[in-house]
Amino acid sequence: MPALMRRGAVATAAALVTALAAACAPGGSSDKPADKAPAAVSTDVAGAGNVTLTVWDQEVQGGMKEQIETLNKRFEAKYPNVKINRVSRSFSDLQKTLRLALSGGNPPDVVEANQGYAAMAQFVKAGMLLPLDSYDQVYGWKKRFPKGLMDLNSVTDDGKLIGSGKLYGVSLNGEIVGLYYNKEKLAKLGIQPPKTWAEFEQALATAKNKGEVPVAFGNVEKLPAMQLYGLLQDGLTDKESVRKLVFGSGGSWSDGPNVQAAQRLSDWAKKGYLTKNANSIKWDDTPVNFAKGDGVFMFGGTWWAPDLNDRMKEKVGFMLPPASQAGAPVATMGGESLPWSITAKTKHPDVAAAYINFITSPEAMDVAVETGSLPVLPAPSKQPSAPLMKEVLTAWTELSKNDGTTPYIDYATPTFTDAFGGPLQELVAGKKSAEAVMKAAQDDYTAFQKKK
């Protein structure tokens, strides 16, 4: 992500992990904090004295916001000597400001640091994050979470390999990118939720012909187009090819199916299937507009489900992207949410570790369900009650059984969001061809591979 992904069967996340080489990042090995030996770790939060723990997160939307607010209050109630100074920012704003904050003289104690080369790998290379392996020996995160999930948040000391090395974060939620639909609009249009891409394209044409906006879409930040492209890519090629391409072990962005995915996105834009002037609409405004009636369908992550459930109630549905053929297994982007990490300069590493352990505990998974989120592990005592959240859980479980998760494509290089996302904006605007866009993606990818 964003990156978001969390619930029932989590074996799919293991497919997201592989050894990858990363680009160079600022900072040197001399900047790195010394590892804390297990004997130096203290779990006595109450004995730490009065502590103010500054936490930066991107949980700004309804259910996600309620989830972390609830967990913060419970942590403070358990440890009255600790005060949580919460700083919340949108995903985009967090990405823009986090590096500067981590390199400053008074950084936050705990942050949500995005996986991938553009964020976590570079922060590790620069010595900005504290390795959590000593704390894992105390709290047992690697025993609680499947190896695949732990690997996603692991990086080698030099920042060149993701999926191995030391642990630098623990995630709370799971996420997949799927298809939301307005049930009332489908009924008025006489359309059933599509089972195949062919049925979906017909539904788009019907919606357009009857004066509706077929797909709610905002793309100021470039990532939305990358996610939509990735779903089209998943529908035109096999999941292993996508995994190898993103992880740098085979394939080319200019391969036939990848160009076809870009061409399909271009065709949708030219046919008016996407919100007009999509490149001027913010990502976070898309679900708000969709809830107000702008769009029959909306592609998006499960992190939007709590807000949409509150706004639309039983009028909204969620499904995995259509299959290539009816009944065929589906692949789509997914994984786990931004991991909670400890900054290298924190003065309260033990309290920070206890906080991370608390907000990713089994109790936290129950809170996730209660607030309409998708916990990365099965909640011990809670099940969703809202129809939309039940559909989200069903989709997550189905995807997990089929090992259908593919990685977010912005993981491919540290500069991919601009190098590929920028040309995709031009594609949506009708200013660049599919072939030219994919050449730009491949050029950036090739340059990165040479740096390995």
Image (cartoon, helix red, strand yellow):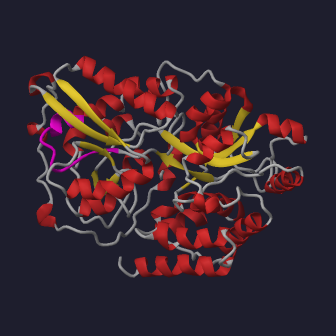
Q: Is residue 283 visible?
A: yes
Residue drawn 37% across the image and 45% down it: 339
Quarter of the image where one finds residue 52: top left
Q: Residue 382 in the image: x percent, y percent?
A: 52, 20
Quarter of the image where one finds residue 118: bottom left
Q: Residue 396 in the image: x percent, y percent?
A: 60, 39
In depth, the one of 246 and 112 nearer the eye is 112
Q: Is residue 344 magenta?
A: yes
Q: Is residue 330 magenta?
A: no
| Vertical position of residue 419 compared to residue 326: above or below | below
In depth, the one of 235 and 250 nearer the eye is 235
In depth, the one of 414 and 224 nearer the eye is 224
Quarter of the image where one finds residue 163: bottom left
Q: Which residues are magenta?
A: 340-353
Q: Residue 281 in the image: x percent, y percent?
A: 59, 55
| Vertical position of residue 251 compared to residue 290: above or below | below
Residue drawn 72% across the image and 45% down it: 294
Q: Is residue 399 visible?
A: no
Compared across the picture, whether 339 is left or right of 442 comes to left
Residue drawn 57% across the image and 40% down it: 304
Compared across the picture, whether 280 is left or right of 70 comes to right
Q: Residue 138 in the image: x percent, y percent?
A: 21, 34
Number of numbered discs: 0
Q: Quadrant of the C terminus?
A: bottom left
Compared across the picture, whether 268 is left or right of 373 comes to right
| Vertical position of residue 29 compared to residue 345: above or below | below
